[in-house]
């Protein structure tokens, strides 16, 4: 049994697929990951023994090229799906199924490949926000704000079908027509399928039953990490009280750089030290003082439990890692689902959600004070003890069930 796991996005899209691949291999299946061939993703997959089938271009190159062009999502989608169809098609040789996630045009390309080859197709989402449910509102895509006069969530999800068709329907149906597949009238539900895998932790954001989508919430797909921390980081940690982590992951925009600058000033004003993740924004200290250490990619599973607090952008992966570590959080959300993860962290009492992506010294100081309170730390530790760690194995068994290998159910 050979299964292709297809994604296109940042590390938060790639690492969970690596975790699923490892568990599929443990069950005796052959797993291949099609992902952007950026160096960091190639290294990640090689570290855990999972083959990489390169997507059409490195994601950082795609982001840079998209920035240089006028932002037109339908046009970008059409460019991506055609190229991804070729890359995923090549990767799918001898495969019995495809599990797809990542950007919508990439998932659409993966589904086209599965249909043309007559193999099983499953869709995965890492956040409940994007799956239809009357329990939450749809994500408002750029240029398509939610109508202020519509308050019923079911009605908003009905409207969301038209939004998704407008943004992605031309590209996906254009590709389908080019390869002889019939037109699809509801792009969203066709690609998400009636039974998507929801790879998020039910403590952080529980999926509630709904007639709109029969999602199978497996828990987050966590890739075990046995790497030790670098010697310089260990020395920094040993030299004083637990520092505060500041990192914005793959957020490469100027807003993330400004947020990090304010964060370092706030941390220093409270007499704390900082561990600063360089990340895609190439973050740097505000001066050459020795109270801030800049790091690259490290083992968050080992680092976060040793932090006084974790200040970050609110990506699904970082939020899950910090919550599992029992570390109080301050989330300064930048885009897409990040404000929703921030709200969940605040509601659980395990951290603070900053209002918006551009903090001031005062606003971030207030948020950090909440995170550093004894009550927040105690609650963060309590919640961490309820988090599940078997999501990737649950999903691997479910994938094999879905393609007829086993009789168990999710």
Image (cartoon, rainbow, N blue to C red):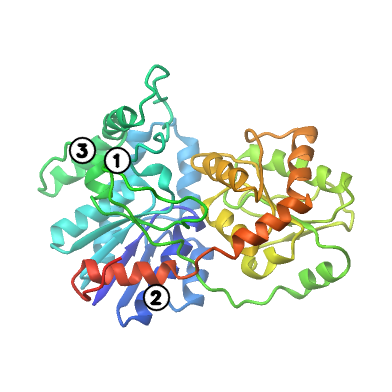
The residue at the far top in this view is: 149
Q: Nearer the viewer, residue 131 or 382?
A: 382
Which quadrant of the figure contains the N terminus? bottom left
Locate residue 130, reporting x and y percent: 38, 43
Would you name the residue on which mark 2 appears?
A: 23
Determine if residue 176 is in view: yes
Q: Position of residue 205 (x, y in %)?
A: 48, 50
Q: Residue at x 38, y 48 (%)?
A: 208
Q: Position of residue 147 (x, y in %)?
A: 39, 20
Q: CA distance from mark 3 to mark 1?
A: 17 Å
Q: Are marks 1 and 2 in contact (CB under 8 Å)?
A: no
Residue of label 1: 78
Structural distance between the alpha carbons of marks 2 and 3: 33 Å
Q: Check residue 186 in the rendering and tell me which mark sits there, or answer none.
A: 3
Count the marks. 3
The image shows residue 43, relative to residue 133, as above or below, that is below
Q: Is residue 48 left or right of residue 297?
A: left
Q: Element at badge 1? A: helix
Q: Residue at x 39, y 38 (%)?
A: 135
Q: What is the C-alpha distance between the residues marked 1 and 2?
A: 33 Å
Eye-nearest disc, 1 or 2: 2
Q: Earlier in the sequence, mark 1 or mark 2?
A: 2
Q: Quadrant of residue 242?
A: bottom right
Q: Nearer the viewer, residue 30 or 366?
A: 366
List x then y, in percent, for residue 50. Answer: 41, 75
């Amino acid at each position: 049994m050979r299964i292709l796991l297809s994604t296109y996005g940042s590390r938060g899209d790639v690492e969970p697929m690596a975790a699923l691949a490892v568990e599929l291999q443990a069950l005796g299946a052959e797993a291949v990951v099609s992902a952007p061939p950026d160096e960091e993703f190639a290294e990640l997959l090689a570290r855990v023994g999972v083959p990489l089938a390169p997507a059409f271009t490195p994601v950082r190159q795609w982001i840079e090229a998209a920035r240089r062009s006028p932002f037109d999502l339908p046009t970008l989608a059409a460019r991506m799906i055609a190229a991804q169809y070729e890359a995923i098609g090549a990767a799918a040789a001898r495969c019995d199924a495809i599990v797809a996630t990542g950007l919508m045009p990439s998932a659409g390309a993966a589904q086209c490949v599965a249909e043309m080859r007559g193999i099983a197709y499953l869709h995965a989402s890492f956040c409940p926000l994007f799956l239809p449910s009357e329990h939450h509102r749809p994500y408002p895509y750029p240029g398509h704000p939610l109508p202020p006069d519509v308050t019923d969530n079911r009605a908003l999800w009905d409207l969301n079908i038209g939004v998704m068709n407008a943004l992605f329907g031309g590209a996906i149906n254009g590709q389908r027509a080019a390869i002889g597949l019939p037109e699809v009238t509801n792009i969203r539900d066709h690609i998400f399928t009636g039974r998507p895998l929801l790879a998020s932790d039910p403590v952080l954001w529980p999926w509630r039953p709904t007639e709109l989508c029969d999602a199978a919430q497996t828990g987050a797909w966590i890739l075990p990490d046995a790497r030790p921390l670098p010697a310089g980081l260990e020395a920094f940690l040993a030299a004083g009280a637990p520092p505060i982590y500041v990192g914005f992951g793959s957020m490469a925009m100027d807003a993330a750089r400004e947020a990090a600058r304010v964060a370092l000033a706030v941390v220093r004003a409270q007499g704390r030290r900082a561990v600063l993740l360089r990340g895609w924004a190439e973050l740097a200290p505000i001066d050459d003082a020795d109270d801030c250490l800049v790091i690259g990619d490290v083992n968050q599973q080992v680092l976060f439990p040793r932090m006084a607090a974790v200040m970050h952008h609110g990506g699904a992966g970082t939020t899950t890692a910090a919550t599992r570590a029992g570390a109080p959080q301050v989330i300064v959300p930048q885009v897409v689902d990040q404000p929703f993860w921030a709200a969940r962290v605040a509601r659980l009492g395990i951290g603070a959600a900053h209002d918006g992506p551009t903090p001031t010294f005062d606003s971030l100081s207030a948020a950090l004070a909440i995170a550093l309170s004894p009550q927040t730390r105690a609650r963060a530790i309590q919640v961490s003890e309820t988090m599940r760690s078997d999501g990737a194995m649950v999903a691997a068994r479910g994938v094999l069930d879905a393609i007829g290998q086993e009789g168990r159910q999710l």
